Amino acid sequence: MPFKVIGKIGVMIKASLSIILACTVSCSSYKSQPSENKNSDHSALIRVNNEQDLYEAFDQITDTKVIELKNRIYNLDKPLILNNLSHITINGNGAVLVLDSLVNDVVEMNRCHNVTIDNIKALHKEADGPVGCTGNVILISGGSNITIINSELNGCGVVGVSAYKSINLKIIGNYIHKNTHYPIIYDGPSATIKDNVFENNGNQNKIAYMAGSPWPPLQFYNKNVTTSELIIEGNTFGGSQN
């Protein structure tokens, strides 16, 4: 009889150890997963609080990042430039970007893909003298899938958005005004320009479209139209400078 009792106790101890071991492995695996995702999300976000932060973010940024600006005025002494980057989002939170230089563009994007600029106000300082401003507000060269949304692009820039050789450009829900030449110049195969307000821009407030042709542009639109290359819909065209 004692032998049988000891045998049963041994079986029970062995079973208990197996359960404890299984639970330890399972719980360890479960706890390791959330911390890995948390670190990944954190590394993709760059928060900007002042001009130095902003320039460092643009100078050091790599692919697949989000730049989040504090809602304040940023006084800039040189352009903000993105080169050869993909999957970048700039959340402006209503930030105001004021460029001191009248000959440079406020924001430049060169050969970038899948970039979104959301909720900024960008402009040059007020010009003194007869020459005025010769820089664009936003200049896009090459690339694809660039989106500018919910933003205000204000002169004295010569053009609100100048985009050359850019594929699938989207300009949606913006207020583009007081640019001395055009609200938009586009040279490319496909663009959606939707739900914007164009007001007090030069050249009768017209969007200039080049369609691969040399300068100057030959096609102009200050009304909503749809062509094989362009979707221009839901926009409001107000008064013009000339």
Image: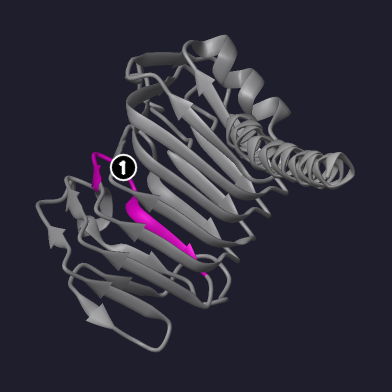
Classify 222 as above or below 242: below
Check disc 1 and report the residue beneath it. Answer: 180
Magenta stretch bounds: 175-187
Q: Residue at x 85, y 41 (%)?
A: 10
Looking at the image, residue 104 sits to the left or right of residue 173; the answer is right
Instruction: Label the magenta part by its dominant secondary structure.
Output: strand
* Outermost residue, bottom side: 228
Looking at the image, residue 108 sits to the left or right of residue 238; the answer is right
Residue type of the residue flagged with mark 1: Thr
Classify 194 as above or below 35: below
In the image, 37 versus 6, the foreground residue is 6
Q: Secondary structure at mark 1?
A: loop
Q: Residue at x 43, y 24 (%)?
A: 69
Percent coordinates x, y for residue 204 in the rendering: 20, 58
Q: Is residue 74 visible?
A: yes
In the image, 221 versus 87, the foreground residue is 87
Crowdedness near tag 1: few (<14), some (14–19) or many (≥20) residues, C-alpha within 10 Å: many
Q: Residue at x 24, y 53 (%)?
A: 173
